[in-house]
Image (cartoon, rainbow, N blue to C red):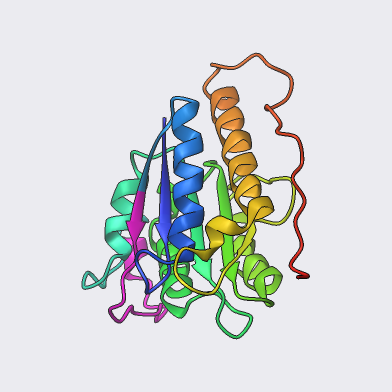
Amino acid sequence: MKVLLLNGSPRRQGNTNVALVEISQQLAKHGIDSEIVWVGNKPVRGCIACGKCKENGNRRCVFDDDICNTVNEKMESCDAIVLGSPVYWGQPSGQLLAIQQRMLYSGGASYQNKPAAVVCVCRRGGATAAFQTLQMPFQMVNMPIVTSQYWNIAYGREEGQAEQDVEGMQTMRTLANNMAWLLKKIHGEDTTETPEREAWTPMHFIR
């Protein structure tokens, strides 16, 4: 089993990557492979509703000059996906949102029935709005949504600061545990009634 983790931050080693690495490492403890793919900091096309992807059997977007089709190809051999994004103005990164819309529309056949999750990282606010925005499209493509102990949010401003968000990092690990449990259930490899749980480590930011 393998999970594709999509880093939608223009900063490759920023706090979004910190959250995705935490998930990746926890998945590895369950014997599940993962790959973090960086969307990048180059321009990404939006969907123009041309419908050409329908002529390609819902596998490829007609535009082949950004990462969209690479993601579609990778999902053909992956069992689940996690999208990670920083929060800008209460919204996900524009690049990731454009990729998500095109990849699900043009490559929908590779996504249906595969578990999905969203992770958002912010300095202070807007994360729940960005989280909801990215999560909603998955529900229109028959993809089971994987949850955690809280909304999948971590906090940090400077590069690497999200590592100090103790509860946020636990939320990422719990998400990974739930993802692993669900994937193993789907593949008939797990007979446990519930996923493993850590003792809750709450954290706030009043100093």
Q: Is residue 146 left or right of residue 112?
A: right
Residue at the top extreme, as displayed: 191
Please identify the dominant SS of the magenta region: loop
| 30 in relation to 199, above or below | above
The C terminus - image quarter: bottom right
| 84 in relation to 76, above or below | below
The N terminus - image quarter: top left
Q: Is residue 140 left or right of residue 52?
A: right
Q: Nearer the viewer, residue 37 or 111?
A: 37
Residue at the bottom extreme, as displayed: 89
Residue at the left extreme, as displayed: 65
Residue at the front extreme, as displayed: 207
Give how far across and how far down residue 161 sits, in percent. 52, 65
Residue at image position (75%, 56%) is: 203
Q: Nearer the viewer, residue 22 or 159?
A: 159
Give how far across and how far down residue 34 sits, in percent. 39, 40
| 81 in relation to 46, above or below | above
Residue at image position (55%, 81%) is: 88
Residue 52 seen in the current view:
yes
* Magenta region, residue range: 36-55
Residue 56 seen in the current view:
no
Give how far across and how far down residue 202 sits, in percent. 77, 51
| 89 in relation to 11, above or below | below
Q: Nearer the viewer, residue 84 or 107?
A: 84
Residue at image position (55%, 24%) is: 184
Residue 173 position by quadrant:
top right
Q: Is residue 44 magenta?
A: yes
Residue 126 position by quadrant:
bottom right
Give how far across and how far down residue 151 sits, in percent. 71, 56
Residue at image position (39%, 62%) is: 106
Q: Is residue 182 magenta?
A: no
